[in-house]
Image (cartoon, rainbow, N blue to C red):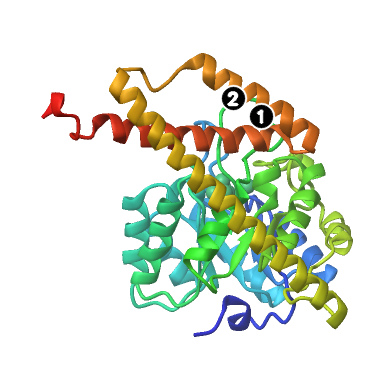
Amino acid sequence: MTTLKQKWGIGADIMLISGPCSAESREQLLQTASALKSTGKVHALRAGIWKPRTRPDSFEGIGKAALPWLVEAGGITELPVITEVALASHVEACLKAGISGMWIGARTAANPFSVQEIADALRGVDIPVLVKNPINADLALWIGAIERVKKAGIHHVAAIHRGFSVHGARLFRNMPMWEIAIALRAHFPGIEVICDPSHIAGKRELVGNVAQYALDLNYDGLMIESHCNPDAALSDKEQQLLPADLEKLIDSLTSRSTGTGPEDYANALRNLRASIDRIDFQILQLLAERMGKIEELGLHKKENNIAILQMERWQEILNTRTEWGREMGVNPDFLQKILEQIHSESIRRQNAVLSSKENPSEA
Ligand code: PEP
Ligand code: MN
């Protein structure tokens, strides 16, 4: 089984896929594709032709009529070209046109019926399929979408991490929640994961930061939107980059090695990792000890018929720990998340104690 990089003959550590959010005209696509080719950095082209837009009356893509432009762009640049599919009819049209690969978009990945329809249309075909994370932060749904495609017999399945939709004002258009992509990699060891910093960032000024973060986490590739005239783009204009700016951005990135580095560093790294293992072990021991105390507390509450949740106590825990954390230099947001997790596990455990049938009065 080869990787997508091997299939497309990409020798670079980071596979770079770029192209416009949408193919808007033959000229726009060919101009963008040729400019990308001349940067010498791009390994595959992307362009959407069926655009699942959040609101009606937005530009929904050119559709099937743009397929010959994509094929032409691939021919001129000698690069693989991929597009988004959401229905079986899209898959059929792409296969007929001779497109090099397809991706399943975030809105489609969230719908198992749609993913299954696509998978069924792909059965018996050997074409790369890239599966974006679903818009909602649901790891199982992302895993399920990849499984459906794999079960259809597709050999080259990669994942695209494009962030997760949340309500309200925020820095990024979609929250990266890196831990979900890390969990996906742990679930599918060896799967190639490509970061889409354009859809995470939503603004071109932030694309570079997100891309660097992905490289720091050892991603296999980047998918970055680019356009020959971003300000006139019909979709996602704030996040698309001029091909020349993409080139600068790629040059500014630092790629990280997957190994441990030269011998001296390797020794230092080994020692540090040994210390981290020891500390993690201690953290776990303390957590287990804390949970033991929680069970005792649960028994006491049960005997005395006391409610599990005491808001003043929870408030006091939050206040004191946040203060201790501040003194120790622990990030307060991070600390709050940990405390909430510990607290909800404590409640769950006490609940189990309270609802157990050991109490004769309940027998
Ligand atoms: C896209 O890649 O242009 C796109 C629509 O992405 P997503 O499915 O991640 O929103
Ligand atoms: Mn887009």
> Which residue occupies the foreground of this view, 30 or 163?
163
Q: Mark 2 points at which residue?
A: 317
* Residue 82 location, quadrant: bottom right
Q: Can residue 226 be seen in this view?
A: no
Question: Where is residue 329 shown, x and y percent of the image?
Answer: 79, 38
Vertical comparison of 72 with 179: above or below? below
CA distance for labels 2 and 1: 6 Å
- Kind of residue sitting beneath label 2: Ile
Q: Confirm or reject: label 2 Cβ below 8 Å from ligand 1.
A: no
Question: Where is residue 319 shown, x and y percent of the image?
Answer: 65, 22
Estimate how packed mark 1 is, as few (under 14), some (14 to 19) or many (20 or more) residues with alpha carbons within 10 Å.
Answer: some
User: Quick one: SS at disc 2?
Assistant: helix
Query: Residue 321, labelled with which disc?
Result: 1
Tags 2 and 1 in contact by the CB under 8 Å rule?
yes
> Which residue occupies the foreground of this view, 77 or 259?
259
Question: Where is residue 3 shown, x and y percent of the image?
Answer: 56, 79
In the image, what residue occupies the spot 47% across and 75% down?
Answer: 127
Q: Confirm or reject: label 1 Cβ below 8 Å from ligand 1.
A: no
Vertical comparison of 358 with 17: above or below? above
- Kind of residue sitting beneath label 1: Arg
Question: Where is residue 157 shown, x and y percent of the image?
Answer: 49, 70
Q: Among all residues in the image, which is located at the extreme top?
A: 312
